[in-house]
Structure formats: C-alpha cells, structure tokens
Image (cartoon, rainbow, N blue to C red):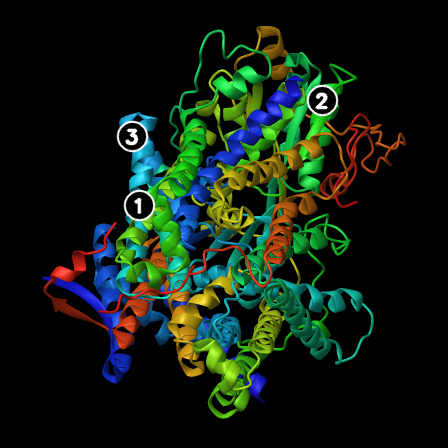
Amino acid sequence: MRRIVITATAMILTAAASMFSASAAEKLKVGFIYIGPVGDFGWTYQHELARRAMVKEFGDKVETTFLENVSEGPDSERSIEQLVRAGNKLIFTTSFGYMEPTLKVAKKYPNVRFEHATGYKRDKNMSTYSGRFYEGRYIQGIIAAKMSKTGVLGYIGSFPIPEVISGINSTILGAQTINPNIKVKIIWANSWFDPGKEADAAKALLDQGADVIMQHTDSPAAMQIASERGKWAFGQASEMIKFGPKAQLTSTLHNWTPYYIQRVKAELDGTWKSEDTWAGLKDKMVVMAPYTNMPDDVKKLAEDTEVAIRDGKLLPFKCPVVGQDGKEVECKGGHHLDDGQVLGMNFYVKGIDDKIPGK
Amino acid sequence: MELFEAIILSVLAASTPLLIAATGELVTERAGVLNLGVEGMMIVGAACGFGGALLTGSTTVGAICGIAAGTALSLVFALMTLGLAVNQVATGLALTILGIGLSGLIGAGFVGERITPAPQLYIPGLTDIPILGRILFGEDGFVYASLLMVVGVWLFLYRTRSGLIIRAVGDNHVSAHALGYPVLKIRLGAVMFGGACAGLAGAYLPLAYTPFFVPGMTAGRGWIALALVVFSSWRPGRLVIGAYLFGAVTILQLHAQGWGVGIPSQFMSALPYLATVIVLVLISRARAGGSTAPAALGTVFVPDR
Amino acid sequence: MLLVLEKRAEQSNTVALASPLIAICLTIVTMSILFAILDKNPISALGVYFIDPLTDGYSLQEIAVKAAPLVMIGIGLSLCYLANVWNIGAEGQLLAGAVAGSWLAVKTQGTDAGAWVLPTMLLMGAVAGALYALIPALCKVRFGASEILTSLMLVYVADLFLDYLVRGPWRDPAGFNFPTTAKFDPVATVPALIEGGRLHLGVVIALIVVAGAAVLLGRTIKGFEIRVVGAASRAARFGGFKSNRVILLTFAISGALAGLAGIIEVAGPVGHLQPGISPGYGFTAIIVAFLGRLNPMGILIAGLFLALTFIGGEQAQIAMKIPLDVTKVLQGLLLFYVLACDSLILYRFRLISPSPKAHHGVV
C-alpha cells in the first residue's frame, strides 16, 4: 500500500514538474559534471571548451551549469541529482568513475537524459560516448619512431585500464612500422592529474634513455620537462604547445564540440535516443594538433597516415596483432580487432617488455 | 654514471620543499609548539608565490610573496594558540583546511598560466665538472637556500644563546618563564619562522619544480614534513638525511617502474610512511620511557602573574 | 597598558552558553565579507548555504546521510580527545573497516548467501577499524611514540593498500580492468529506511552511537575514568585508573566506529569498493568533534551543521557559481571562532599596566 502511495506521489510530482518546467522555461537546461578543474589544460578543459562552443551555437535556447572537481565517490551521485533537481534535462558526466552514480540517478529520473563519457553501461535515458584516441596515438607512434634517436620512447600512464593500454599498444604498433625494434619504458602515475608526479616520471624516463615522451595523464608537466631538456613530447587532450614551444610534436586533441552540439540539438528537437558513440578522426572527435618541430618528410608521413586512418584505409589494430606471449590474438572483427576487444584490451603487444601492473 | 647524476639531481629537487618546510617546523616544535597546519601554510605559499611571480615576472618576488603568505597564516595560528591559549592540534587542523580553501580561491585565476622557472646557477668550468658539477654548482636558489637554512638553524640552536633559550622554552616553559624569559614572544618568533619556511617551501613548487599552478599541488607534502621532523628526532643534521631519503624513495619508485621492476607501485609509494612509523617506534624506544621530543611540545602556556 | 590573558577562577557558564552563538555570528560576518569580495550577494549566498537545504525534503535526507558517518566517527574521536590522546588516523581506520567488510562481500559475490552477510560485514568493519587503531595506540603505550604521527602515517598506508586491492586481486573481472570491485549483492548492501529514499541504516546506527556515548560519558565509571585520565593523569593514577588501558580502549572504540562508518559508506550509498570512497570523512570528523566540544549531543548538532555546509556549498556552486573552496574556508573559520570563543570560558582578558618587575631577569 505504501509503495503505491509513494509511486503515485512520485508520478504526480514528476508530471507536475515537467508540466511546470515545460510551460515556464523555454530554455533547455544542460548540466555538466567535471572531475577536475576547468583550468587543468587537459581532459576537463576540453569538455569545457566544447560546452562553451555549444552555448555559442544555441545561444538563448540553452542555459548551462557545470560543477567542477566532483570526486567520483558518494558525492558524485548527490551532485548529479542536484543538477537534476535544479531543472537540468540533459546532463553530461565526464569521467568513467561516474558510471554507477549516473546509472542510479538515471533510473530515478526517467524524464532526464544522461550522457556518460568513457563508460560502458547504458539505459533508456543514458548514453555513452568516447573518442577513438588510439587512432591519434598510432600517428604519434609513427612520428615518435621517426624522431627518436635513442629508439626508446617514454610513456607516462595513468591507470592500467583498457583505454590506456590500447593507447600504448596503438602507439607501439605505429612506431613498429618505422622501427621494428622500438622500445618503450612505462611509468604509472596512478592518477589522471598530478603535475609533480608527472614531472618526476618524465625526468625518470628521460634519465633512463627515452627521448620522446608520451602521456595519458592530464597536466602539461611532462611537456615542460621535455622542453627543459631539449627533448620531444606529445601533448594529451589539449594543446600543450604553450608549455613546450620547441618540444611539442603534436597533441591528440579531444574535440567534444560536434558531439555536444549534436546531442543538444537532438534534445531540442525531441529526437534524443540512447546511443553508444565511439568516434575518431573521421567524425572529428579526435583531432590532431598541428604537426610542429619536425622535418617536412615526417610531417608529410604523419598527415598521410592521418588521412589514411580517417578514410578507413589504415586500421591501427589490423590483424594479425601479436601479443607479448608471441601468439596471435584472435581476430574477431574480420580484418581487425573488433570494438569489444579494443574496449576490453588487457594485454600488451609484442615489443613491449613490461608487464601490466596488477595482472 | 650519467644516470646516477640525473637521479641525484631529481632527488635533490624533490627533497628540497620537504627540507625547507621541515626545518621551519623543527624550530617551531623546538620552542614547544606543535603546528599541524604546515600543509595549509605551504599551499597558500604556493598560490601567492605563483601569483607574485606571474604579476611581476620575477621568481624572487614570488618567493617573497610565498614567505609572506605562510607567515601571515602562521600569525593566525599564533594568535589562537599563544594569544588565546587554544588547543594546538585543533587549531593546526583548522589552519590546514582554511589554507587549502584560501589557496583554491586565490589561485583560481592562475590555473593554466605559466611562468619562467627560477634560474639555475651556472659557473663556467665548475658546473661542467662531470657528475658533481651540476649537483654542486648547477642548482636553483631554493636548493642552496634550503641547505644554508639547515646549517643556519643548526648553528643557531646549538651555538647561540638564543638557540639555547628556545630549546629551554620547549623543554620546560614554566621554568623558562620563572627565569624571566618572554616565553610567548619567543614562541611567536618560532611560529613565524615556521610559517615563513612553509610558505617558501610551498612557493618552490610552482616557481621551480613545475612552473605552473594547480590547486592542491602540495599533495600532502606538508604532512610528510611533519613526519620528517619527528623522524629526525628534532635534530637538523638528521633532518637533511631524512628529507633526502624520502625524496629518494619517491623518485626511485618511478625509476623502478621504468626498469620494469615488478613490485606494486602502491607498496613503493607506501614505503616512506611505513618507514616513518618504524623510525618513530625505534627512536622512542632508544630513550627509556619516552621520545626525545621537546618535553613541553604541544602544551598550552599561559603566564601567571 | 597591556592586554593579557589570565585564567579564570571558575569556568564561566555564560560564556559557555553564548560561545557557539558568538562563533556562528562571527563566521557569518566574515563569510559575508568574503562573498562581497567574490562579487556575490552576501544575503543570497548565506541563504543558499544555510537556509535552502533545510527547506527541501531531499536535502534534509542528504544532510542526514552525510552527517551519519561524521557523527559516528566524531563520537569515537571525542572519547580519545577527552582522554588527551590524539587519534588523527580515523580516515585510515575508516578505510581499514571498508576493506575488511568488503572482503566478505567480494567473497560471497554471486553465491546464494543469506541475510547473515551484511551484519557480519559490519562487524568485520568495526573489528578491523579497532585493530588498525590499536597499532598507533600500542606504539604510544609500549614505546612512547607520538600517536598523532603514527596514526596519520597509517592513513596513507591504508589508502595505498585499498588502491592495490581494487586494482589487483579484487578487481571486477567484468569491469574492463577499471579499479573497482563488482557491485555488491543485495544481501551485502545496507538497506534504505524508506524505499526510494536515501536515508539508510547508518543514520539509525549513528543516533544509537550518540545515545550510547552520552550514557557512557555521563553515567558510567568508565566514562569518568576517560575524562579524568585526560584532564589530570597523575590524579587518575592515584585513583587507580590506568591511563594506558584507557588509551587502548579509546583508540579501539574510535577505530571501531570509524571502521563501521567506512563499511556502511561502502555498502550503502556507494555499493562497491573503489579508490576514493571517502571524501576525507576521517579528517572532517575531527572538526566535528571539536565543534561539538567533545560532547555527544554537541557532536550530533555539529555533524548536522557541517553536513549542512557541505550540501549548501554544493547548491551554492550550482545556483550562484560559488567555488567549493569557499566551503572549506567557511569550515576552517567556524572552527577557529568556536575554539577562540571557547577559550574565553577558561580564560579572560585583563588590561593591566606594565610593572617594573616584568623587566628583570630577561634575555
């Protein structure tokens, strides 16, 4: 009996709320949950840029709110719910760790839409989206192999999750097309954003003989160190050339703008559907920063590779992919590893000497 | 050998903020005051130090701003614990929280900016000596300052009358007061010195270590500095060893990963903290029945008339 | 003319009553100045922080949910602080409890375990927290090592250990290598009090703890013992109270409460074990203990008040774009003012003229 009363009350309230908001507000309220500060010049900054571009595109039709520095623990569920209660109808949660809280809140508020970045759980009113960053890393691998004099690359990883592992593998696969004996040293920062640690890791990698630094962490610290030492580095997520004008070769930029505009438009038009989007160079979700500080022939090679990937002619994970153990990995996608294999990637390719931590 | 030199340089840089902050806190604790707010003072030092350098283009001005910020916060602490006889532990914790909040507000506008890092010494001929050249003659001002400070503090505490008085105040403030020494004034000076050092140590991070500001960039170094003071049994000489040891563990942990050593990184990261606990136990056992801390550490003093 | 602090002959009762109110007023005034500097309307900001969350059923629930662990841990800490030992490691004890209880949840995952799982998890959490707290306590009692620093260092160790577990042995095999355990089974989850609401069993437990502490401190010999050991350890020895045992007991209790709070957080609002499950509850609880003046009812009120500032701060971020750092400043200031005003209970200021004898025998 109690349950009936509660459900009925909830339904009446929701109906009233939606009627009220539909008549009172013409603006669509869109909310954003950020894991870091908007000034991080990395992951969150790119989301913020996209948000601003989206606001510019739709002008008066939208009103946005963002919460930054929301930790992934119990506070995140409350923050998401507070955005809902503040009247936001479309909410973007921009970190993997928000997956369960977003799902919980989505179940509670079926009339609100949720977009979760880099996750894998969906619902009728919850979509997921991410970028094929590994495409950019393949190109970076090629450039790195061409530019490196020592044949040793330095990689600063955040956490040994598939997204990062596939990034490492893609880099090495690209590098191996230029130098089959390329070596890579990997240090795990165990954080997405820790400039002090990233700087120390970069120093350690350079000290151990690497002369090109790649990172899957968010601060420009490594770029700064590489620049100080006269070595090269790749920026991550954002343009980091300000911190390394002579050091940055390129960056894999996260460009969420087209996706955000597309989804807000769908919401405004009433055509929003739950989807799973994983787009790359072709859809401009991944964009390469201008190729700098490299000789023209390397630049041309990079540009050609980019075009080839974009047109689908070149696939970073085309078969055969040989694992660390020397055995060929099962090729589930025909000519290349399928999306599921990349999303769940839990092995290093041959040529990487390290072991994945925790295995 | 080049790798060895490179590691030593990294360790020096990583240990410097710990050494500077711990030196200041050592003097404060020697005078009998336990200031747990080191992290808060360091982080406002970082924010103000970066701001100063950003606005004037000079890292020296930045360092001065950092020192000023740390000292200002320590004055609040002094007002509470010395002026109002408030519990030192609670005040120190409140200071930390306040400091973290303030630095976030002050530094909000600085995120994403960059400055030219503090210059490093270069003496042609000397700095080029293999291995030792850069270690001895190629550091930035903060590293030299940290070492000079430790030597200075050691000389002050053990070779001057004022240093003796500070130690007396820390061991028995009642007797010191009876002898006519201005206990509260002495403690105030010690607290301010501690604040200045913490501010300078915090400023080191965005001025030399990674030349940009990030909220929370001290990342718990203030707490490590507190541990260092105890680890060193309140002796400046041991403080240097301790600071470099802690710095070394942090750096070597990363190098070990690069070499493919398979120990879980969390274990390596935990080593400095476990080491501190073990050292704490060991040094406390060395003196029967108690540690070698200043006997009046943390106790409240209100002069009776 | 000199302003000096001198001890009162007797504690002032008027100040004791007025001090929290004065502290709150001073905080409000300072915060208003801060809001003005930040270019936000002080009245609206204060309203969003303190009034709005109280007008909304959802927010009230959230305040209770957020306050529950703070109050539980705060009560435990107050026992230590009354005994004059400083447990700063509640955060680590919280994590130890979370890990221990989660072990059972992970072990029984997917099996058809019965309703015994949850109570056992909670018990294991409390025991683990207590044991973890006994490490610094024993170091103090046996070796004289500073409990402040040992308990603090162990926080980092516990945090890293948790990190290792969820990235390695306990990682959800279906979770794509992400550092989290699988979602706990329903038998391993703390039930909500009202369906669909956010209030859970933890809130009830917190209230029971408050009542228990009030009884312990107010009406039992043990409680008296704790307070005497803290206030005058030599007198305590004459009374036959062994301070070592009190130290071990208070640490164990506070560790148990912290561990219990930890496993309740994991098994309740969060539902699985992951890094960063606690947004610093162990440290915030220290503030709550002091704000509550080490008194069970006071801690309950302080916990609720602090939770109110958290919730209010989040709403202020949404409604007025006020950064979350302002909440930290507010909490720090509040603690400062409460401590300062409280010192006037024991001491007072006096204006005196400097006398000649103050100058002799000086440095």
Determine which quarter of the picture holds residue A48: top left
Residue bearing mark 3: B61
Is the C terminus of chain A in the top left, top right, bottom left or bottom right quadrant? top right
- Taking depth in this image into account, of B170 and A286 the one nearest to the observer is B170
- Find the distance from the CA under tag 3 to the CA under tag 2: 47 Å
Residue located 49% across and 55% down the image: B293
Left or right: B192 as drawn, with respect to A354: left
Secondary element type, mark 2: helix
| Dot label at residue A174 | 2
Q: CA distance from mark 2 to mark 1?
A: 53 Å
| Disc nearest the viewer among 1 and 3 | 1
Q: Same chain, marks 1 and 3?
A: yes
Which secondary structure, mark 1? helix
Q: Amino acid at mark 1?
A: Thr
Q: Amino acid at mark 2?
A: Gly
* Residue B150 vertical position relative to residue A240 in the rendered view, above or below: below
The residue where tag 1 is placed is B71
Report, in whole angstroms, how far the alpha carbon at label 1 lies from the one at label 3. 15 Å
